[in-house]
Amino acid sequence: MSGVAYEYMEHYIRGLIEEHEGILKELEDYGHNNLVPIIQKEVAKFLELMIQMKKPIKILELGTAIGYSAILMSLSSKGKSSITTIERDSKMVEIASSNIEKYGFKDKINILQGDCLDILEKLDDKYDLIFMDAGKGHYNQFLPHCIRLLNEDGIIIADNVLFRGMVASDELVERRKITIVKRMRKYLEMVSKDKNLVTSVIPMGDGIAVTRRRD
Ligand code: SAH
Ligand code: MG
């Protein structure tokens, strides 16, 4: 069990979502066979919906891995979004670059190699959608940068915020994960308590939090 949603519920919801074909299916198979933590099926569907609603021109992603979610977002926008994605692991950068090249997304997706914190400090463009999916123990540090880089009407979608349920229950917390869990709780408190922000935490996948500036 994921520790976030009831298993039967997850199973049911996933059953409603049609299997991908082609590029996305190939990347999903690669991800699952190689234990790459790509976004879950229902989160992929949620991102697709958000992108169709929001029609972001510029997207920033933290955590490229093999390029699955970046390619999914590009396809969801029908190629209308330009995506910048950050990854620090050189092996992942290599795999993602080759996928992006192979499937023809070179003009749409740009990978920046390095640690998110170092790169975020140097960015100064504005983004319509920021997808946070790297370094669970550092979301609280990424947040001020993401807010600075967020367009007036932009949204931040953070993945894995409930981290197998551990964030919501001390009984589930594994010893080695205590620091990550505490920092993730801090992130959720920051986005929930800030009067200038409005956030919804959704127990879907591994937990997602959607944040925007309050009108
Ligand atoms: N978004 C991807 C999955 C990302 S998995 C998808 O759904 O397809 C998380 C990735 O973040 C891993 O590849 C890991 O190497 C990278 N990562 C973790 N911490 C990071 C950091 N501080 N800076 C940059 N990349 C980081
Ligand atoms: Mg994730």
Image (cartoon, helix red, strand yellow):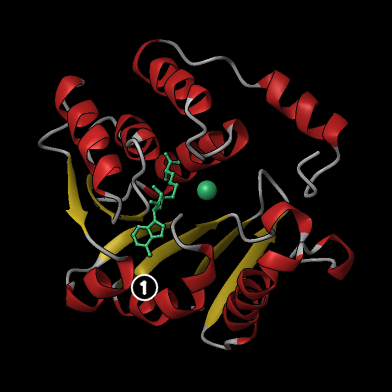
Crowding around mark 1 (Cα neighbors within 10 Å: few <14, some 14 to 19, many 20+) is many
Q: Does residue 167 appear left or right of residue 39 in this picture?
A: right
Q: Nearer the viewer, residue 147 or 187?
A: 187
Q: Does residue 6 appear left or right of residue 52 in this picture?
A: right
Q: Does residue 122 appear left or right of residue 53 in this picture?
A: left
Residue 148, given in percent of the width and then of the height, sits at 31, 80
Give the quarter of the image for residue 109.
Answer: top left
Q: Amino acid at mark 1?
A: Cys
Residue 67, given in percent of the width and then of the height, sits at 32, 37
Rendered-image quadrant of the N terminus: top right
- Residue found farthest to the front: 176
Give the quarter of the image for residue 185.
Answer: bottom right
Give the quarter of the image for residue 91.
Answer: top left
Residue 168, given in percent of the width and then of the height, sits at 80, 66
- Check the image and report above or below for 84 versus 119: above
Query: Mark 1 sits on what residue?
Result: 146
- Residue found farthest to the left: 107
